Amino acid sequence: MRRLICLVLPVVFAAVGAAASEPVSIAVPRFTLWTIEQPVKVIEQEYDTLAPGAHTRYRMREVEIPEEILREIELPVLTDIFIRKLADSSKFSVIERAKADVLAEEIEKGGDGSALAKKGRSLGVQLIAVGTLTYAARDVELKPVAYTARTDRVERGEIRVDLRILDVDTGRIVATVPGQGRIERRIREDTAEPRPMPGSLIVDLREELAHDLMAGTVDALYPFKVVTVKGKTAFADRGGNFRIRKGEMFDVIRRGSPIVDPDTGSVIAFDEEVLDRVVVTDVLPKACRVESVSGSSRISPGDILKPADVTSP
């Protein structure tokens, strides 16, 4: 039996507790391109419009991503794929994107947050997930195979999106989720002349990114849990929708006393006990069956599952 300390986010959204009887409503506006503040030297004519002694002003600049890749990624399509996967997780009630875009406009306006809270309540939204594309790249490498007329064609691509999950009522950031889609694939061709790769790399990258972002969003708010137990067999609340695979192993964790930050009063960690190790024996669309490796029957509904370190005993 092992004990460990689990770190948690300092901000806890009360409506996302274990006792929640219905999915939390979440809105996902269209993803945007990441913008950064770029320092610009002040010209003489601008001195009078700035604070005395100011020598630098700032302008917002979008991160540089090749136009061709941006056109192929299609940010609205990427957003919709993420929304589909988030809805399929069964953890959220996802609001249609048209309503989500209305909330995004309120965020852009700034203000004290009261307008956002009012608009959110009128639309029945509790959380809003704001995503920004921060990186996208791809390249193709042709590698001639020695002493043949064949060529190895290697295509690589990567997309990254940062997601901020906001509490609509308070405007506070509940969680931040980095998402990444990364693919490298290789095909051996019978000729040194380049040929198009089968399928579209961008299509596959969008799927990978959306899945990674969905899994990270759920992980940030809901741990992977045991829901029912019968003898040495239990069912947990993730399945094919989270790409759980038969034969995967997980440690069963029981959460103990919270550890509170004395400065802020917020929970920063939990004392946790490792009860057992289980193996996935069957995968359903939205759940999986697991069995105890040791034969222990200490597992109870609500216990948390975390990927096992197969190198540890």
Image (cartoon, rainbow, N blue to C red):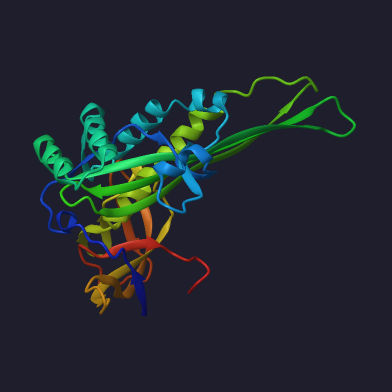
Is residue 245 visible to the viewer in this orientation of the structure?
A: no
Which residue is painted at 55% across and 25% down in the image? 67
User: How far across and how far down the image is residue 89, in percent?
Assistant: 28, 42
For residue 296, what is the image quadrant?
bottom left
292 is higher (above) or lower (below) than 135: below
For residue 274, what is the image quadrant?
bottom left
37 is higher (above) or lower (below) than 233: above
Give the position of the N terminus as an image quadrant.
bottom left
User: How far across and how far down the image is residue 15, in percent?
Assistant: 15, 54
Viewer-nearest residue: 270 or 245: 270
Q: How many numbered marks does the figure carry?
A: 0
User: How far across and how far down the image is residue 148, in percent?
Assistant: 87, 28
User: How far across and how far down the image is residue 138, in percent?
Assistant: 61, 34
Which residue is painted at 50% across and 31% down in the image? 204
Horizontal side of 50 relative to 63 (left or right) equals left
Is residue 19 visible to the viewer in this orientation of the structure?
A: yes
Task: Point out the residue furthest to the right here.
Answer: 147
Viewer-nearest residue: 292 or 43: 43
171 is higher (above) or lower (below) than 72: below
Viewer-nearest residue: 210 or 32: 32
